[in-house]
Image: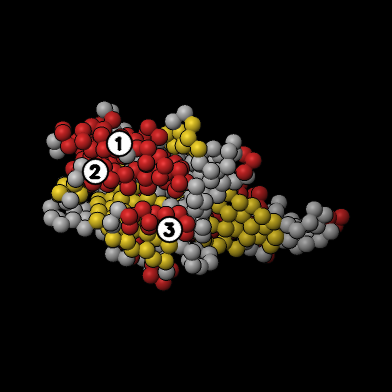
Amino acid sequence: MSDTLNTQLCDAVDAGFDRQIAFLSELTAHPSTRGNEQSAQDFMAAELSARGYALDRWQIDVADIQHLPGFSPVLGTYEDAVNVVGTHRSATQKGRSLILNGHIDVVPAGPLDMWDTPPFKPRVKDGWLYGRGGGDMKAGLASNLFALDALRACGLAPAADVFYQSVVEEECTGNGALACLARGYQADAALIPEPFSEHLVTAQLGVIWFQVHLKGRPTHVAYAGSGANAIEAAFPLIKALHDMEHRWNDIEHRHAEYAHMDHALNLNVGKFEGGDWTSSVPAWSTFDVRMAIFPGQSIKAAKEEIEKTILEAASANDFLRNAPPEIVYHGFHAEGYALSDDSSAMARQAISTLEAAHSTATGETLEREAITATTDARFFGLYADTPTLVYGPKAEAIHGFNERVDLESMRRVTKATALFIAQWCGTEDI
Ligand code: ZN
């Protein structure tokens, strides 16, 4: 690709950057937590249509995906889960096709008084945009879209099909990305600009979510000895799960990408409910757990060990021995995925193309990182044979308070993405 075109593309990103920030602000103002993504998806659909992309918008149907590898069980229905895809069809089909994926769903804001300013009233200060979802990952959705815009501003279109995906459900199951696969979207590579500081993600962990339900025996606290406290009974089970977590992190179990990390796999008790009254021995409790697994680690075997761990710990409790905990799976059944394990020519080419694009756009070498979270990359990488590059801007406090994204980093990623698209897909005149 010529230096002139590189320069033109970067200039086009600069020229459109104020509009890109306005787009990101408006998108971040939509409070697209799970089940509330509609208005954000309406906005995305309108932006894609206005640019002339062929729009596909559909409600996820569990029946279409539940038999597929990578499906995660869900509680409730998918009445509100709508995916949006905009397609560019190349006239010449000279190049390699591409999926540009991002998720529209954001995690809950948490207590509002922990935020300096309201999470869904984005503001820009000192080069950062603040707001829930601004970093994770609406800035990525913006960079994908405005990278395509930069080509157009140069009178060019990708010389291969490009599928721009705005999916739901990334933060709890990944079933939005899975629904894109089930709908037939395939390409030679995928790019997901999750906010990992402009690093190329070489590996990601798998994640399992489960719920443990305990039932005790209610009694007045004055006779607590005859009751069974369903909240306190949970403590030894949680301790046993943490012991399991430490075993799984042992060096001999680690995937090569995580060999240097003492504690890549984290177990988190993320929710706890139980009891009805301060002076009643609680008759029930429920806690929600997130546990990570390494790439290559079997979900089935992991679940078996989780169940064994809980039931063994319960058997040490006089009450739980006769009223064993119930384990319910809902949400993530996510395998790990390592791009670095993909030895295909397509994967090598995708990585080297991104390396070149990043270094031209930023003047820096592309760093690599194995992350201790999951992303939708696993669907394309594991179940569709599509090398998937996770590469996005720098953000801070994602899932925390005062989440923010570095706007200059978004600019660099947008430039690198424009260069990547032009090189990967090739270009044709509009
Ligand atoms: Zn994300």
Q: Quadrant of residue 221?
A: bottom right
On screen, residue 314 versus residue 295, left or right, reads right
Dot 1 crowding, Cα within 10 Å, few <14, some 14–19, many 20+: few
Residue 234, x across and y down, in percent: 66, 53
Q: In which quadrant of the rendered image does the N terminus lie? A: top left
On screen, residue 95 versus residue 236, left or right, reads left
Report the amino acid beneath label 3. Answer: Asp
Task: Give the CA separation, mark 1 to mark 2.
Answer: 9 Å
Label total for image: 3
- Label ID, residue 42: 3
Dot 3 crowding, Cα within 10 Å, few <14, some 14–19, many 20+: some
Task: Give the CA separation, mark 2 to mark 3.
Answer: 24 Å
Residue at 80% of width from left, 53% of height from top? 278
Report the amino acid beneath label 1. Answer: Ala
> SS at mark 2?
helix
Task: Give the CA separation, mark 3 to mark 1.
Answer: 26 Å
Could you tell me if residue 39 is visible in this image? yes
Question: As rendered, which of 430 and 91 lies closer to the eye?
Answer: 430
**Of labels 2 and 3, the one closer to you:** 2
Whichever of callouts 3 and 1 sits on the residue coming sooner in the sequence is: 1
Q: Which residue is mark 2?
A: 153
Q: Which residue is mark 1?
A: 15
Residue 159, x across and y down, in percent: 17, 51
- Label ID, residue 426: none
Residue 193 position (above or below residue 116):
below
Question: As rendered, which of 105 and 173 lies closer to the eye?
Answer: 105
**Of labels 3 and 1, the one closer to you:** 1
Q: Quadrant of residue 162?
A: bottom left
